[in-house]
Image (spheres, helix red, strand yellow):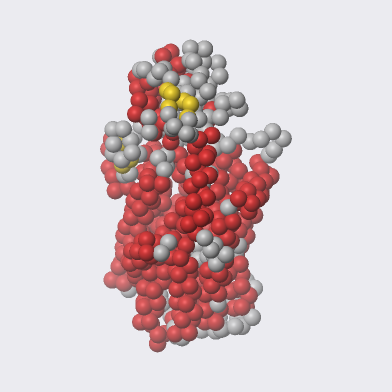
Amino acid sequence: REYCANRPNIYFFSVRAAKMTVTSPTDESNPCSEAVVDPSPSAPDANAAQQSENLCLSESVDDATNTTTRNDQSENVEAGAIGVEEQCPVTKSKPRYIGWIERPWQMKNRFSIPPNEIHDEATAWSMDGSARGVLNLSGIFLGSAILPLALKAAGCTSANCSNTVYGLRPTSLLSASSVIVGLFTALTMPFVGAIVDYTSCRKLVGGSTAIILVVLSGVQIMISQNTWFVVLILEMVGGYLLNIHTTAVLAYLPDIITSGEEELTAYTSRFNITNYVTTLVYMAIVSGTATAIEKENVATAKLGQGLACLMCGILFGYSWKFLFRKRAPLNKLPARSNLVTMGFKQVMWTTQRIWGRYPALLWFMSALLLSPESGSGVFLTISVTFFVTVVGLNSAQIGICVIVLLVMGVCGSKLSQYLCIRFNPLKSFQFSLVYFGICLVLAGVVLSGPESFYYAYLFTALFGVAFGWMTPSQRTLYVTLTPRGQETEIMGIFQFCVQILGWVPPLIFTIMNQSGINIRVSYSCMGIYLFISAALLLPITDYNGAVKLAHNDSVAAARVKICLPRRGSADLKTEE
């Protein structure tokens, strides 16, 4: 599709074909067989079938003169495309009376013909991302309520109490739950990735996990002194399912982004904006309501879970019912292979290739192992424990802190943009890790108790700048170091690195807390992981050379994958 995007006479057909669900059989003799779209055999328009079979026209490329010889079999392609699209409806038709739901999240594709058409799956990706953001933040209110209930169940009157409940100190429960979720995710992620990559169950996995997540969110409204431990277990199950759901959603991204880095940048920016606005509205409603009527932690948690259930039910339900569509497997399962082992083999093969060919990308992946994103929410889990037990914040005040975090994240994004241009994404990412680590160390030193209440908001603002600075720099560095055409494969190893050691920081925090070490010391030690991540980036001494290597490999891959007609097309003259 990328190849055809620059050919005006067949571009319209390639855009239409991108929305089809039917793919052609693999032809090993054809280096571009995956780009051929084969309509259903029952298509009434024979001309449409013939035209779609020869979507990628033969072309010979001369590197010295850059001359192109194009086959002249591209007539009536547009007419054939329209006939094919009618045969293969993109998604389930949306009733007009609920079409307004998607408007705030609608994504227009300015690379389409005609331009600015609504991209259904990009819109679905935006809605799903906003729902995932709401679920993550609802866990903050839940954790803020579980900690006081656990302290009361253990008979503790302060956070320094050594009493235990279910074998652990109350202040260790949230971090211990993150360890369990992280371990299960690390052990099963390659298998889940194999299901998503090598079967057509992408939509089934994403849709079913979305339904379960909404149900769990609604059930957690029952939190009370008698049910808090059950709710904690349900939260662990939900955290694990959310990681699986995210894996299924990420598999749609290569099909959404089809026109290169410019389109990726445009969509990523709009995804972030809609996610930011949705989560900010959620936090403002819950925190504002809880502050206005002076609700306690448990009541605030119930309000947060109820609103999250409502919002996620609408966003998940609409996107997976009407916008996401069933996809063919991303890859074909090799002979004598099975899904149980294939995911682990794929991780090993990709790692070996990165090790030998892309050392800069290897060091970047190594730095991700202990970065703040590692474990998907570990930082927030430990921070909730620290701010509730040491500073004494309630759920409403925690919500205000999160709002400050989100708002200051905008400032951090602007800083990231400036530093990526002024220096480069590598330096910007390194600086952000060091800055974040210093903030964590200082927070453990300065925030000593309820008397440092107002400083909590200051450090939350500093954390917001760190997150807003670090995340765009990390994403930009990932994009610039990844060769084009290998995004799907390397995205899998990227997700694996983010999750595989996500359980280590909460495990060390739990061990330190169980040993009686002051929780302020344990919290400050989180900065060490960021310093290690920054140090792992030091071997990348030639960033420009690494980017050039990725670019050259992308160009080489594009020259090799010349689109030729499928074997068996008797009416076409194949020029090589």
Query: In the orientation shown, which residue stands out farthest toward the bottom?
Result: 451
Instruction: Tell me if I can see residue 160 in this picture.
Output: yes
Residue 438 position, x and y percent, is 47, 77
Camera-side residue of 412 and 225: 412
Residue 544 position, x and y percent, is 48, 57
**For residue 137, which quarter of the picture?**
bottom left
- Tell how many labels: 0
The N terminus is located in which quarter?
Answer: top left
**For residue 529, which quarter of the picture?**
bottom right
Instruction: Tell me if I can see residue 388 in this picture.
Output: no
Query: In the orientation shown, which residue stands out farthest toward the front?
Result: 64
**For residue 110, which quarter of the picture?**
top left
Residue at x-position 50% and y-position 35%: 559
Camera-side residue of 296 and 68: 68
Residue 353 position, x and y percent, is 63, 48
Camera-side residue of 556 and 312: 556
Camera-side residue of 442 and 405: 442
Q: Is residue 63 left or right of residue 290?
A: right
Query: In the orientation shown, which residue stands out farthest toward the right?
Result: 336
Q: Is residue 340 left or right of residue 484?
A: right
Residue 288 position, x and y percent, is 30, 68
Residue at x-position 46% and y-position 52%: 479
Residue at x-position 43% and y-position 29%: 67
Residue at x-position 43% and y-position 36%: 2
